[in-house]
Image (tube, rainbow, N blue to C red):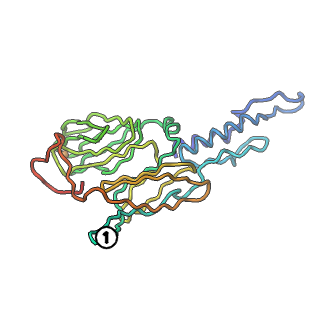
Amino acid sequence: MGPVGQVGQPLRTGRDFSFRTAPKNHDEPPAYTSQWSYRSYAAAAGMAAVIFGAVATATETTAPEPIPAAAPAATHAAPAVHGAVQFVKKGLTGRIKRVAAEDVVITLTPVTAERTTALLPPRTIEIDMVDKRFVPRYVTARPGDVLRFMNSDDFRHNVFSLSANYEFDLGAYRTGPGPPVTLDRPGVIKVYCNIHQEMACFVVVAPTDSTAVTGSNGVYGITAAPGQYVLKAWSLRGEYEQEVAIPDTDDVLLDIDIAITGGRSKQHKNKHGKLYPLSGDQEEY
Ligand SMILES: [Cu+2]
């Protein structure tokens, strides 16, 4: 639980954070009566719990008097938002075709994301290159995080992106990591290798840790604290966006239809914006 446990700890030693008031007379032991400090600390703990998506309760305490309830904290043990994602396409005859949507990256970003994620420490996220594949293929990261691309193959790979707002070319190298890529804004980065056309990975940058990637059944589930969010679903074949309100106790069932806009076999260009010299394996791009 890492920082979550740290957050919860001080609640049990709450008197360390309260102001000692002078005893009414010298026969009474010192009393810890500062409502203000308990209340504000509980509120702060509750807020921190919301930030970290944790559950914080004030059940264990050595305080000598009742403690006001903590600010609303995460109350969802199970996924707060869940459902099934489908690609939807109108066939030539006008019939609607639906298929379970695999490899859809879903992010649930709190509307207060700028405040909350500013408190989170940046992370270094490693993406390996193994057997001419980026591993993992789908990555979620926050602004502030740093990407490092390792190379576990015994031959050279190149790493580049021509995505809007995220253009870079890390050059070709045999062993990693290559130069770091600092993420400084939300967006989707399509990362390719200029040597091997079949290599691709996709980094979705959003100020949240509430994310999911669908498997072959298209089902997703995301844990998050109650509050107001923007849900975004990104896939090579189409995108989707909707506001979501997570209530204090109930979960939200949200099935998602993504209208297919991208083709199955659209090829990406090399770093010069040209076709790869020799077409090798053809994957979906
Ligand atoms: Cu390569």
Say whether residue 49 is left or right of residue 41.
left
Between 120 and 115, the residue placed more toward the observer is 115
Say whether residue 269 is left or right of residue 12.
left
Say whether residue 132 is left or right of residue 45.
left
Dividing the picture into quadrants, the one containing residue 213 is: bottom left
Task: Give SS at disc 1.
Answer: loop
Between 167 and 151, the residue placed more toward the observer is 167
Q: Residue visible at 90% across and 28% down?
A: 25
Residue 24's spot in the image, x, y percent?
88, 29
Q: Which residue is mark 1?
A: 94
The C terminus is located in which quarter? bottom left
Q: Residue visible at 45% across and 62% down?
A: 255
Q: Residue visible at 58% across and 44% down?
A: 49
- Establish if 48 lies above or below 21: below
Q: Is residue 153 visible?
A: yes
Categorize mark 1 by other alpha carbons within 10 Å: few (<14), some (14-19), many (20+). few
